[in-house]
Amino acid sequence: HLEYHDGMERYFEAKRKLFSDYTAPGWLGAVNADDEYGNSLMREFEGNAIGYSLKAGGEKPRVKLYGGIVREIGIKGMSLSVARPDGKSYEVDSPLIGEYNASNILESFVIADSLGFEIASILSGIRNCKRVPGRLERYSLSNGVTVFVDYAHSADGMEQALGTLASLSRGPIRVLWGAGGDRTPIKRPVVGNIMARLASHVVITTDNPRGEDPADIARDVERGVKNSGRCVRCDTVLDRKEAINHVLDASLPGDVVLIAGKGPERFIEYKTRKVPFVDSEAVLEWARGHSAEEILG
């Protein structure tokens, strides 16, 4: 959302208003103590803003914190140890993956605990949380391919998503992505470079082209792939459904496929129209047509 706020400081000020202007007396909030802006909120709203941290050591504000440690993480989930400020600790299991999800889980624990929910209910809720639409949304297929649908549309988002999958996967990583039109074109080759660096197969497709020609956008992305110096397979398939079919057709047992950019969005936006389209539905349609049913759990 930085394009709407002209930099991090103004973005932070907009977020800060959630604490300063839109809270009732006696409010409580959870903030990330591993982040400089979170620390600022904790200092300003001491007693109301409750901190949580995934990082051991380091200088922290002189307030009580909830601490979390990722004990184990794999392609199908993670386990954490969560310590409350009173010293009591709990083992937490979740089907979600990714460091940002570990942070989200810890934050959710803090909020629920602060609201007085029973610990058993909190742990059960985290353990039974199903896929979060568009946030490393996992589909394990019976043909041995694991597909993730993710909203990653920026350079940082792509690096985090691909970096997470690369650290957990033993097989090749394939990634599908297309940049949005009429938005920060400078990021297109940057993301292309990241995909070439972290994946073995890149498929460039259409996102929300808006007023731009999808082929022009794809060429910008392709330039970043070629300039990476990496010898990776790179295909351009502008029709997004065909692109998803293409990357899944190419996948082998043990492969991990990241379909990125749109996440939970339910349409493709062109200059004068919006066309209904959902990445996850396209994945499941392909699976049904190839007898590669989804394995739940």
Image (spheres, helix red, strand yellow):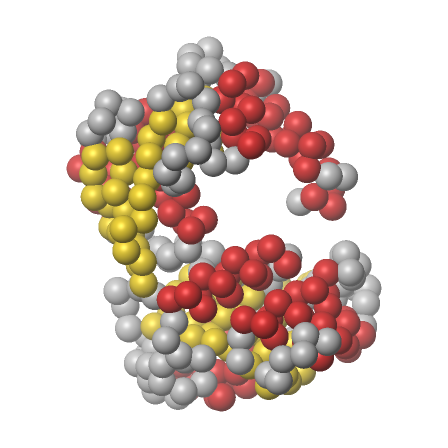
Count all numbered tags in the image, as a single digit: 0
Identity of the residue drawn at 47% across and 76% down: 173
> Residue 180 at x, y = what percent?
71, 63
Identity of the residue drawn at 78% across and 61% down: 185
Residue 12: image quadrant is: top right
State the quadrant of the N terminus: top right
Identity of the residue drawn at 59% across and 78% down: 202
> Which is more toward the observer, 206 or 168?
168
Is residue 34 found left or right of 194 in the rendered image? left
> Which is more toward the observer, 69 or 100?
69
Is residue 243 found left or right of 9 in the rendered image? left
> Residue 81 at x, y = what percent?
25, 42
Most distant residue in the top direction: 25
Most distant residue in the left direction: 120
> Residue 283 at x, y = what percent?
46, 75
Residue 108: image quadrant is: top left
- 292 versus 69 height, above or below: below
- 156 versus 175 height, above or below: above
> Residue 268 at x, y = what percent?
65, 65
State the quadrant of the C terminus: bottom left
Can residue 80 be seen by looking at this rendering? yes
Identity of the residue drawn at 33% across and 30% down: 66
Can residue 238 be seen by looking at this rendering? no
